[in-house]
Image: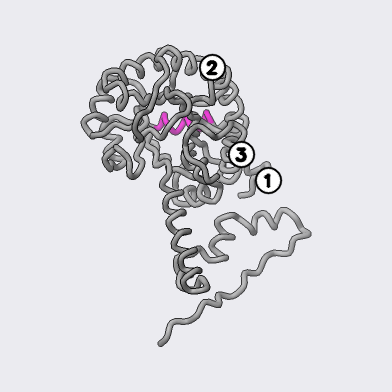
Amino acid sequence: MPYLDQADLPTVPAGLRFRALLEEGGILELPGAHNGLAGLIAKRAGFRALYLSGAAMTASMGLPDLGILTVDEACFFVRTIARATGLPILVDGDTGYGGVLNAMHMVRAFEEAGAAAVHIEDQELPKKCGHLNDKKLVAPEEMAAKVAAAKRAARHLVIVARTDAAGVEGFEAAVARARLYVEAGADAIFPEALTSREMFERFARELPGVRLLANMTEFGRTPYVTASEFADMGYAMVIWPVSSLRVAAKAEADLYAAIRRDGGTVALLDSMMTRAELYETIGLAAYEALDSAIVATVVPPDLRPKAAE
């Protein structure tokens, strides 16, 4: 339904709705949505919450994930997806965009933009994707101070502390950092780039009673694990951070290659959302109904070439 219609807006803050989903038990599945349309498609598929990846935001801008993104740029993505879907969103907050005060500013800005939760990582700037080499970490105490400050700044926002220590300082250091971040007030822990099922299982055993988030990114250091398997290991959330963008980018590459090759798009029509399907997904009719001056759209007939008998 249109976000312009106040009657359709959620009345409960996003952070509280996110917490309620966590309280249901099981595992909360958080597919990545890199824009509002992707979020709507995920919602139509039945997902009740979403994830917004920093890598997906920067790639959407044609930039690498190196901490270049600003808070205001990230808020545009948050606001767009929150408005389009009305779903609670866990947002990648990178390193908090600087020091303690920067992290507090990020929390307030994200919450005002409609975010439900944020994760902050313990890398130095310039940061790197968690599955890449030669990451550098801040001192545990510096990260703990950011976590405590983020909790102080939040109204309802869920604060998730991510540690990249497993691939830099070793597994035991990652566990020690996670415990320190929980003591600082983190609502959940995100152990990044664990490289085996055994590591995921052991991490959960080392932090009993702590909500944990698993990252099921493709082409990284983590083996492919299903949501139900993560749940059996004791994880409360799982994200597929860049999957929607990867699929969209591959489809776009195929489209542009076809136009160059064929001089048109006919060969790919069956791979496209039709005009009618797109309008239904974005709720065009519902928006038109809000303004009596807009004549209801009549979708043109499908003119694609018929297959030979």
The vertical placement of 287 against 301, above or below, is above
What range of the chain is rendered magenta? 15-24
Kind of residue at disc 3 = Phe
Question: CA gap, disc 1 to disc 2?
Answer: 37 Å
Residue farthest bottom in this picture? 309
* Label whose residue precedes the other's in the sequence (1 or 2): 1
Q: Give percent across and percent down for residue 215.
A: 36, 36
Kind of residue at disc 1 = Asp
The vertical placement of 126 against 279, above or below, is above
Secondary structure beneath dot 2 equals helix
Residue farthest left in this picture? 198
Question: Is 262 or 249 nearer to us in this picture?
Answer: 262
Q: Which residue is mark 3?
A: 76
Q: Main secondary structure of the magenta part?
A: helix
Residue at (26%, 30%) from the top-left corner? Answer: 200
Question: CA gap, disc 3 to disc 2?
Answer: 22 Å
Quadrant assignment for the C terminus: bottom left
